[in-house]
Image (cartoon, helix red, strand yellow):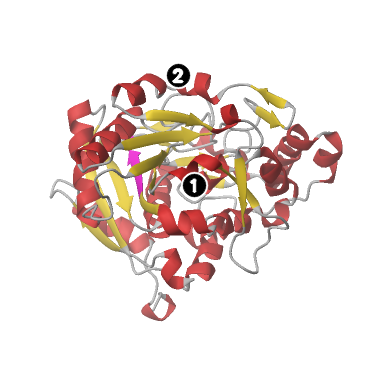
Amino acid sequence: MQDLMNLSSDVSLAPLNRKPSPQDMDQAIRDAVFAVDSLDWLQPGDTVFIKPVINSGKPYPSTTSPLAVASMIGLLKEKGASRVVVGDMSGVGLLHQSPEGCKGSTRSLAKSAGLLNIVLDAGAEWAFFEEAGWESFYEEQPAPGSHWERGIMLPNVLQEVDHIVSMPRCSRHALMGNTLGLKSVVGYMRYDTRLEYHHAAKSIQEKTAEANTVPTLLQKQRLVVTAADKVLATFGPDLGHVIAPSQGLVIASRSVIAHDLISLAWLIVQWRQAPWLNKQFLTDPSSNKIVTNIANHLVAGILGGWKWGISAENMENSPQPNIWRDRTLQRAFELMGGIPDIQLHPTQSSILPQLLAELASMVALPSASRAA
C-alpha cells in the first residue's frame, strides 16, 4: 500500500498575483507542474481526465479556477495528449441522482461557474457523470480494513482514460472542515455511495481518505494541482469569506497527501486572517458540532429520505482547521505508512521566505514520526 499511495514528498509552489491574466496562470501552472513532474508518463495519443470541483454553480473559489483548468488542458495537449476529458458530478441540494432519473444538471452549474465554455474553447471535452445514467458506473473496493460497507461506485469514463489529474480548490467545508484534494473524490461517487458516506457519518473523514485508495485512482492519478490565488477561508463549500492575498499560489504534487498538507496549511494561514464575525457557528458551521450534525442529517435526508436523515450517525470534527487533528489526513497517513517529509519547491524567488518558513513549520514533525 505504501508504494501505491505514492510517498512523494515534493510539493511545488508557484506565485500568482491577484487577478492573474490567462498568461500569468499558464506560466504558474507550467512552473508548478514541472517543478515536481516531468510528465514523462504522458505518451502521444494518451487520454487524460481532469477532475475539477463543480459542487455548485458559484464562481471560483467555490469551484475550481477556470483559468487553471484551461492552462492545464493546454499543457497536456502540448505534451502529447490526444484527448483531454474534464468531468465531475455536483453536490447534494443542486443535483439529485436516482435509478429513475436525475434532477438538476452539473452542466448548467459548470456554465454558471464559468467553466463550461472555457474548457471547450481550450480543446477539451466534458463528461458530466449523471448524463450517462445510473448504470454508467462501476464498483471498486477501497483498501482492506476500510469503514465502507459496500464498494464505491465510480463513473465508467475513468475506465476509458489513461491518466487522471486532480484539480481541487482551497476551501473550508461546513461539514468536513475543509475540502482539498482528498475530499474531491466525492465528486466521482454515485448517489447511493454518497448516501452511505453521509449516513454512516461517524467515520465520514476516514471514508474520505479510504475512497482515495480505489485501484483506479491508485493506478491512474498522476498529479494534484490547485490554483489558490483565492481561498474560501470560512464556511464552504459554496459560500463564505473569500480572501485574495496579494500573492497567491499554485500548489502541485504527485501525492494527494503531500498536496493536502500544504493546501491545508495555506487555508489555515488565510482562515486566521478572516474577520472574527466570519468564524462563528453560523458563519463557519464546522466550528460547531451541533450545527454540523444538523446539516449532515439534512444531507442524508435529501439523499435517502427522511428515515435516512433521522437515523444518520453523528459526526465528530475539529472546531478549528488543524493539520494534526484532521481525521481525513490522519487516516491517509495510516494508509500510506506515515507522514511525508515535505520538500517545498518554490518556482520563483519572489515567494516570501517568511511564508515558506511558516508553511514548512506547519507541516513538520520530529523525524521519528515521519514516513520511512
- Looking at numbered disc 1 in the image, what kind of residue is underneath it? Gln
Q: Name the residue under label 1.
A: 159
Q: Is residue 82 left or right of residue 362?
A: left
Q: How crowded is mark 2: few (under 14 residues within 10 Å), some or many (20 or more)?
A: some
Relative image position of residue 300 (x, y in whole percent)? 74, 39
Q: Give the range drawn in magenta.
A: 224-229
View extreme (right): residue: 307
Q: Front-most of 314 and 246?
A: 314
In the rendered image, which residue does mark 2 sit on?
111
Left or right of 297? Residue 107 is left
- Residue 331 screen position, x and y as percent: 56, 64
Question: Residue 312, how many percent across, how many down?
Answer: 79, 46
Height in image: 46 above or below 120?
Answer: below
Main SS, magenta residues = strand
Q: Do the residues labelled 1 and 2 touch (CB within 8 Å)?
A: no
Query: In the rendered image, which quarter is residue 90 located in?
Result: top right
Task: Say which amino acid is labelled 2.
Answer: Lys
Q: On residue 251, which mark appears?
A: none
Front label number (1 vs 2): 1
Residue lying at 30% horizontally and 29% vertically, measured from the top left = 67
SS label for mark 1: helix
Res 57 visible? no
x%, y% of residue 110? 47, 24
Residue 299, can we see it? yes
Q: Is residue 341 left or right of residue 272?
A: left
Helix, strand or loop at disc 2? helix
